[in-house]
Image (spheres, helix red, strand yellow):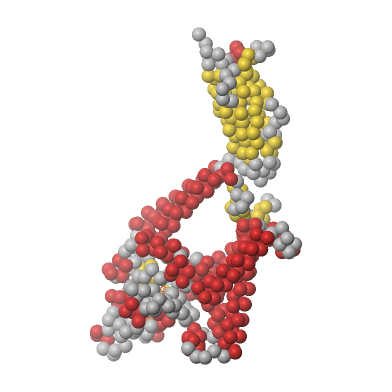
Amino acid sequence: MPESSIYFRDRIATSDDKGRRKWVFARLPKGRLTIRRHWVALILLTVFFTLPLIKFDGQPFVLLDVINRHFILFGNVFWPQDTYLLGIAMLTFVVFVVLFTVVFGRLWCGWACPQTILLEIIFRRVESWIEGSAAHQQALKHKSKTLGWYTRRIVKIVVFAAIIFLFVNFFLSYFIGFEDLKTAWKTGFVDYQRTLVALIALTLAGTFVYTWFREQACTIVCPYGRLQGALTDNDTLMVAYDYKRGEPRGKTHDLTNQGDCIDCRSCVQVCPTGIDIRNGTQLECVNCTACIDACDSVMTRIKKPRGLIRYASEKGILTGAPLKFTGRMVFYSIVLGGLLLFLAFLIAQRAEVETTVLRTPGILFQRNEDGTLSNLYNYKIVNKSRRDIQLTFQLVSPQGKIRLIGSQPFVKKGAAAEGVFFVDIDSTLVTSHELKTEISISEGEILVETVKTTFIGPIKP
Ligand code: SF4
Ligand code: SF4
């Protein structure tokens, strides 16, 4: 019996009994799911390389300027004052991840995770062009190394580093903007030392991960992978081996006592994490679907129905019921959709200008010689738009006027302005001790916001 079938519960497939690394020589998969995954990867990579180049209204379409706390998401600008939205977005994201994983398991890992796309779809293929097939690499492992082997190994590392370098450049442009990245290159990084350090550090780290660390990022480091045990249950969708149909496995000709699995180990040979899916669900499985394609091609060859390994839930395998969209999946999907809609609503409702007007503490009212009463107010205006704005205050109700100390407020984009003003109201109109007051804030003719406050007058007998 192969070692992976005996010790799979005691240690991960990529380590031996002494804890030493066992290198995975995964065969490249072929099949309908592999083709689909490649298409999805192509779309995602196109989005990744295109987004930083897109401009909207003269600014990047997406920018995550963490250092200056300035974010642009799909044309919407977010300033530090929108931190509450970031909090809600993160909360929504966490709930989304939990619900998504409960229903769809590691679908993300297999189809959209950058680590899987880079390692399985790009680097493993480049590696096979340079060093030969997985079987060839494995055969050379214990042979004495020739000059050709070392040359190919060096070429591989250089090519990997070059690809990672390209990715890191685009990755950094999400944080500093593509224009700044171009300027950094043109000026030799004179004013961009931090960018240069990040560029070198990430390229080195990426080269290390994809030339040596590889699948261990998923099986040992990734926190999402470690969470699977807590988030999935018997109804969760996953890549699963149909043991009821496959067992007892073997190559005998006694078809009456034999399941559909012919123990050819094709599914193990293509597995990038080195596991045998026939042992059941394992944390190392990244749901890459390579074993589904490998087994399907075997089933086609021996004229059996495909799907001995397939997307299914544990319960589905046990009962033999075909995969269907259960009520729970529908419910969770509705909740997921609702959460996203809620976030979209909050973003759409977000005001470009936020004004706070508060009566100056410790001061009641003043009587003026012209028969009016005055209250003093402090204001603060936050401009979240992409332009500088000149605003004007006007008293909407009751009748009276606003007397600004200084000029009408001018607020730079992404900045805040503070100041004070008096509200003067004819004493005959101040009919109560606390008068409801409404103040409009306009940009030219356009009403931007209306704020409510109170006006304090004398206590009437
Ligand atoms: S590829 Fe299919 S038939 Fe071959 S060992 Fe795996 S499960 Fe069995
Ligand atoms: S068991 Fe199958 S789906 Fe899971 S990682 Fe291995 S090949 Fe991919």
**Farthest-out residue, front:** 18
Q: Left of 157 or right of it: where is 21?
A: left
Q: Position of residue 2 (x, y in %)?
A: 34, 83
Query: Is residue 407 visible in this depiction of the protein?
Result: yes
**Farthest-out residue, left:** 257
Q: Position of residue 222 (x, y in %)?
A: 46, 65
Count the numbered circles shown.
0
Q: Left of 262 or right of it: where is 116?
A: right
Q: Position of residue 59 (x, y in %)?
A: 67, 52
The residue lying at 32 percent from left, 67 percent from top is: 314
Is 389 drawn above or below residue 401 in the view shown?
below
- The foreground one among 199 and 391 is 199
The residue lying at 50 percent from left, 66 percent from top is: 113
The residue lying at 61 percent from left, 73 percent from top is: 161
Q: Quadrant of residue 245?
A: bottom left
Q: Left of 262 or right of it: where is 370?
A: right
Q: Position of residue 367 (x, y in %)?
A: 63, 14
- Which quarter holds ligand 2? bottom left
Is 340 drawn above or below residue 140 in the view shown?
above
Q: Left of 351 or right of it: where is 238?
A: left
Is 410 drawn above or below residue 322 in the view shown?
above
Query: Is residue 400 visible in this depiction of the protein?
Result: no
- The foreground one among 311 and 357 is 357
Q: Quadrant of residue 301?
A: bottom left
**Farthest-out residue, right:** 187
Q: Quadrant of residue 277?
A: bottom left
| Quarter of the N terminus within the rendering | bottom left
The residue lying at 49 percent from left, 80 percent from top is: 28
